[in-house]
Each structure stands twice: as structure tokens, then as C-alpha cells.
Amino acid sequence: MNHVVVALDSFKGSLSARRATAAVARGLRRRASALVVHEHPVADGGDGTLDALATAGFTSVPVTSTDPLGRPVEACYASRDGVAVVELAVASGLGLVADVPLTAQRAAAASTYGTGQVIAAALDAGHRTVVVGLGGSATTDGGSGLLAALGVRLFDADGAEADATTSPLNAVRAVDMTGLHPSLTGSDRVELVVASDVDNPLLGAHGAAAVYGPQKGADAVMVADLDAALTRWADLLHAATGVDAASSPGAGAAGGAGFALFTLGAHARRGIDLVLELTGLAHRLTGARLVVTGEGRLDHQTLRGKAPAGVAAAARQAGATVVAAAGSCALDLDELAAAGFARAFTLTDLEPDTARCHDQAEPLLERLGEDIAATLPNP
């Protein structure tokens, strides 16, 4: 074979992975009509994961759920061959509360209850493996809402059951695990997988509240309050389960949702590795002459487990040349080469105005596709 694979992640706030990938592919085909181009959108386990899986034989299953503030929302998960993939951001993401001012009160109230409802629906449907992609959350509830939706009962200081549709974290003083979903107990329990590229612990200076709380509206006082509440929550779950997961790498992901899932016996996988495995990228790369990958901005974060770095590593292993298509690039030539990229093509090369790049990302990516095709030698 002598084909090109286009495997882009989303351009956040502008284009989904599928639309970005399709735009570059159109440009390639327009400039080189004889070129065989395969479209393979990717994600790193966070926002856009379900979108990427939709092109790999996964079916979207709708679930009526609640958003981080307890309001009704239509969510979904992806299903294929007994595997369910849940994207936390679909029910508990920042985008769902964009209509509410970014305040400390909003940060404290946001709950993962809706994500727990989606996981419960996947378990009720009989899936034997449930993958939960963490990223883009509006929450810092330590996964308390998520656990409540899975049958864990949470009680306040007066012995009353806490409402978990908004974060119960500050009120919880006792935990009863006996109602936990039966698929998550016993020797035949379902496999739970956490997909994340975050290795933060739950607590402290590098924990969920300190590192990610400010992005969700928490001020310095609220960060301290959240960390104290998370500490109390970790002690309660440790006492109730015998599992001490607070220091596990990734426990602080998605405001501590990683911690709650680890307490249930989940194991972690790097998000991009899991997505590439589930979408069958390695097979697609066999015999490829060129791989185009990228995202909105290539920078040092890209090199630490983001989708383009994962695609580049897989492409190099397959013997293909890799080029990047991105909105902008903060990496120098040596850094690009060390990461396996032969070259980076950027929207800012075509349009220096970043606002126009954002608004015109799709046609500009088509032009990048044409420019990339122009560099290819004849087969």
C-alpha cells in the first residue's frame, strides 16, 4: 500500500477531531486526486473521545443524565463488543455549565453524579469492560457524586442521606458501600479502566483542588476548603473500603473522579494509547507513506501524552513519515524532530490573525492539506 493517514485531534473551541481530520483529507485529495487518504480522527481520552470512536465501529447509546449542577442533560456512551466507553465531559464537563458565572460557588457545587448515571447505564446493559475517559471536568467532588449514582450512600453529620446531584463533598461524614452496583462487586466484577494523561494525586499542592480548582472557578480560600474536604473524603473511603488510593498517580484527575474509580478497583491506561488501540490505528498505519496528525496548538504539553505525540510514536514504529497540522506551533525544529515530526504546517502560516484562524479553521485546514500534498514526491 502507498496511502496517507490523517489522524487529527480536535481543535478545541473550533473543530471536532472528525471535522479537522476531514478538512485536511479534503485538501490532500484536491491537490493529489490519485492519493489514497484514510481518515482516522483521534483523542487522548478526554474531550472528543466518543467522537473519535464513532468512526471505529462503536455505537452511541443515549442516556438521560444530569449535568454538574443537577440539571437534566442528554448524555451518551460508546459501545462495541461488550466494551463501553464513557467520556466524563459529556455529563460532567465545563461546557455544560458555561451559562453559569465562573465562581467559587459553582466550583464547589459541581458534581459527577451524571457521569455515574452514565456508567450505571453501561453496567445495566451488561458491558464487561467500562472505560472512563477523564478530562474537561467542571467538578472537584472527589467522585462522590459518581459513587452515589452507582449505589453508594452518603450521609451528613445528622445521619441524613446527602443529595449528590450537586456536590455532596462538604457535607459527607459517613459512607455506606453496601448498595454499590452489583457489577462492581465480587470476583466476577466488571473491568473498570481509567483513561487519562494526568498523574496528579488527589491531595496537596499537586492535587485536584490546588492544580485544577482555579480553572473551575475556585479562589484561594475555596481551594483550601476543597482540599480539606477531599482529605476527609479520602479518609472516609479508605475506612469504608480498605483501599487507600489518594496518592495513586491520576487520583486527582477530573477533580478526584480518578480517585473514586481507583477505590472501586479501576486500573489506569494512558488515554491516547487506549484510544489508538480501540480505534485500530496500528492496522491503518501498515504500509502508510505519510501520517498527518495534530491539534489546535503544538507545544510542550503535546509531547507529554497528548494525541499527536501518540500518533507520531505509532507512525514511526510503522516506518511512516509524520508531519503535523496545527493551529500554531510553539516547538522548535529540534523539538519537533525529537518527537518524530518531519515538519509542522500551521494555520498561522496562512493567516497570522489568531481570531481569523479560529473562525476559519476548517477552510484553512483544507489549504494546509493542499500544501502538504504539494510536498509529496510522486509515488
Image (cartoon, rainbow, N blue to C red):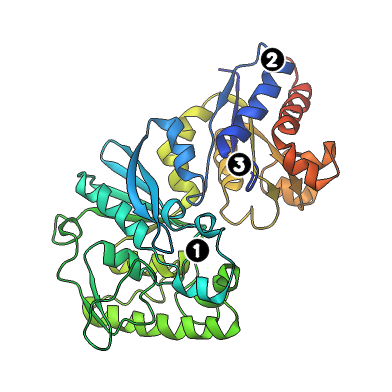
Image side of residue 376 versus residue 102, left or right: right
Q: Which residue is mark 2?
A: 379
Sequence-earlier tag: 2 or 3: 3
Q: Which comes sooner in the sequence, label 2 or label 1?
A: 1
Mark 3: amino acid: Ala
Mark 3 and mark 2 in contact (Cβ < 8 Å)? no
| Residue farthest along the top direction in this orientation | 34
Q: Quadrant for the C terminus, please.
A: top right
Callout 1: SS = loop
| Residue 201 left/right relative to 324 | left
What's the residue at 60%, 18% (across, down)?
Answer: 2
Q: Residues within 10 Å of mark 3 (few under 14, many from 20)?
A: many
Give the alpha-carbon distance from disc 2 to disc 3, as whole Å.
22 Å
Q: Residues within 10 Å of mark 2 (few under 14, many from 20)?
A: few
- Asked where in the image residue 157 lies, by quadrant, the reply is bottom left
Q: Is residue 347 above or below residue 155?
A: above
- Residue where numbered disc 3 is placed: 312
Q: Can residue 207 be seen from the camera position used here?
A: no
In this rendered view, identify the residue nearer to me: 114 or 185. 114
- Mark 2 and mark 1 in contact? Answer it, CB < 8 Å: no
Front one among 214 and 155: 155
Upstream in the sequence, badge 3 or badge 1?
1
Amino acid type shown at disc 2:
Pro
Q: Residue at x 35, y 66 (%)?
A: 165
Figure check: 169 above or below 124: below
Give the structural element (helix, strand or loop) at label 3: helix
Mark drawn on residue 138: 1
Front one among 121 and 276? 121
Q: Assign the N terminus to one quadrant of the image.
A: top right
Q: Position of residue 63 (x, y in %)?
A: 32, 46
**Gap in angstroms between the C-alphas marked 3 and 1:** 30 Å
**Which numbered disc, 2 or 1, marks the residue closer to the eye?**
1
